[in-house]
Image (cartoon, coloured by chain):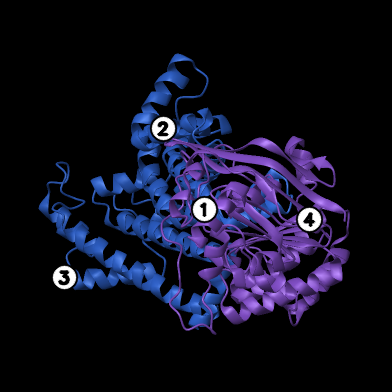
Amino acid sequence: MEKILEVKDLHVTFTTYGGTVQAVRGVDFHLNKGETLAIVGESGCGKSVSSNAIMRLIPSPPGKISKGNILFKGHDLTKLSEKRMRSIRGVDISMIFQDPMTALNPTLTIGTQLKEGLKQHRSVTDQEATRRALEMMELVGIPNPEERMKQYPHQFSGGMRQRIVIAIALICEPELLIADEPTTALDVTIQAQILELFGKIQEVTGVSIILITHDLGVVAKIADRIAVMYAGKIIETGTKREIFYDPQHPYTKGLLNSVPRLDVKEKLKPIEGTPPDLFSPPEGCPFTPRCPFAMEVCNKVYPDSSILSDSHSVNCWLQDDRAKQLLTTMVTN
Amino acid sequence: MLKYIVKKLFIMVITLWIIITLTFVLMVSVPGSPFNSETNSNEIVQENLEKHYNLDKPYHIQYLLYLKSIITLDFGPSIKQPNQTVNDLLGRGFPISFELGIVTIIVAVISGIILGILAALRHNGIIDYLAMGIAVLGISIPNFILATLLIQKLAVDWEIFPVATWSSPLHMVLPVLALATGPMAIIARLTRSTMLEVLTQDYIKMARAKGLTPWKIIVKHALRNALMPVITIMGTLLAGILTGSFVIEQIFAIPGMGKYFVESINHRDYPVIMGTTVFYSAFLIIMLFLVDIAYGLLDPRMKVNKKEGE
């Protein structure tokens, strides 16, 4: 399969008065054409920072891509000039933001905001831009698009605004869409509609999607593959099936256990403890203090990635043969 | 919208009436009269004069006469210069004061906004510190001190600009500079802080994600939102410039309305006091009204709220 995006050993740091925050610490992942990859993790694990790094939208200073490569169709985005990058943003790679209530400019009409990107990058007349905008509004399911185009964001509901944000992101027919928590700010019924819309969009346009979320329900609905992130690192990746039915990392298991379920009448099992301080991240596995299976080695050395299948890999000492032996002896005793 | 304007107009008239009444009360409660100076010691002459100007009548009659003169827009002749009516004075002084005020506002708004934007874009950089340094100086130095400084340095020592009066664009430079610096500083500081806030908004990030040029992002997306608070304080600034112009006109010997206003109070020239006060108040009230309208034009959310209020 053709890889549209490949992120290699990405490091992002933020320099603050209190010290340097290592928000992303060596992230590797790739995205195939037409696929949906979900990056999952709790708040502050670096998932949004990674996605902003791909768009080169990290505010600098204080932020900086300190190491690593981002290959988009073979071109390294970290090496491009800001001007060149502008011609990629919105055209080849688009982004959808978390909160549709704040992502639209309150003083400009919906039509203006829709057409703006198209006019910036393509030499189109206003008429052509309008026609294209109407098409997009129809695609994302906005009734009376002609009338709605003349209105302002405050005249739209949250769900409708998110549809507009999606339409704006898609208007230049990008090949990659980064959706940063696109449904977090919406209520559940609207969430379901927006997720369905993502499926429809992918069918119509064939766009590849990176979905950033902490909501495993969302992931289950639309992702093909999943990357689980913790404390600035990706600790496990696999297909949706592999992650949901055969999770290997204790953190992934913990995440899945902490999803509320209707069919099980048990108390929710949260992961105890809090993530590490990224001002001075631990040398070993960052999950060690919260991990029920932690061993001495976990504190000291970060585990290499263990390949379980073509698509499934995990960074955990439990995958080591010695740990497996230990576990079997413990069970037999 | 029409209902809103009518309501506003009604409030404006009430405001004006309160100002007129207060001015009248202040006028009659301040000791002294136009004819008290040493030269007019003859009692009979004084009585006749008071009769002529209706000053011998009880206060409520005087008050009603004043109201009548305002409604008919005929303030009568000045007491000190009986050959001129108040309307003559206004007609002569106002265009000059207006010119000074307008040029000052334009200079203050444009330079203030530019300074504010530059400071915000180079946040915590040299330009930021420089601009904010200028702004702090501009706010803290009263305009009459700045005016004398400017005259001393630019007019007397270096002879770049004329010292005083109002006859060519070159004559405008110093008074406008003296009058505009304060409001400019306030606008610059406000623009900077709102701009900094707006630049962190999601819609700015979204505009960047669309691949727009920095220029477009700032002018189209950021500036309009950042200017709302600036529009809001324009009313106060206008009032400040108006009152500031009295002093500045005195210092630079500009034959505007300020001169008549100050002199009329010193001389207890009642018709002129009334006329200038009413005129200035009406002008300011109308300006504030225009600021309100401008606010609605800049922010689409305002318009709808007004409609819903109907």
Q: Are marks 1 and 2 on the same chain?
A: no
Determine the chain carrying the residue at label 3.
B
The chain coloured blue is B
Which residue occupies 20% across, 73% down? Answer: B60
**Front-most of residues A203 and A121:** A203
The chain coloured purple is A
Q: Position of residue B94 (x, y in %)?
A: 46, 50
- Residue that badge 2 annotates: B252
Mark on residue A44? 1
- Residue that badge 4 annotates: A310
For marks 3 and 1, give the one nearer the viewer.
1
- Residue that badge 3 annotates: B58
Determine the chain carrying the residue at label 1.
A
Question: Is B229 displayed left or right of B268 in the figure?
Answer: right
User: Label 4's element?
Assistant: loop
User: Label 2's element?
Assistant: loop
Neighbour class for label 1 at 10 Å: few (<14), some, many (≥20)? some
Which residue occupies 41% across, 76% down? Answer: B10
Which of the 4 image quadrants contains residue A11?
top right
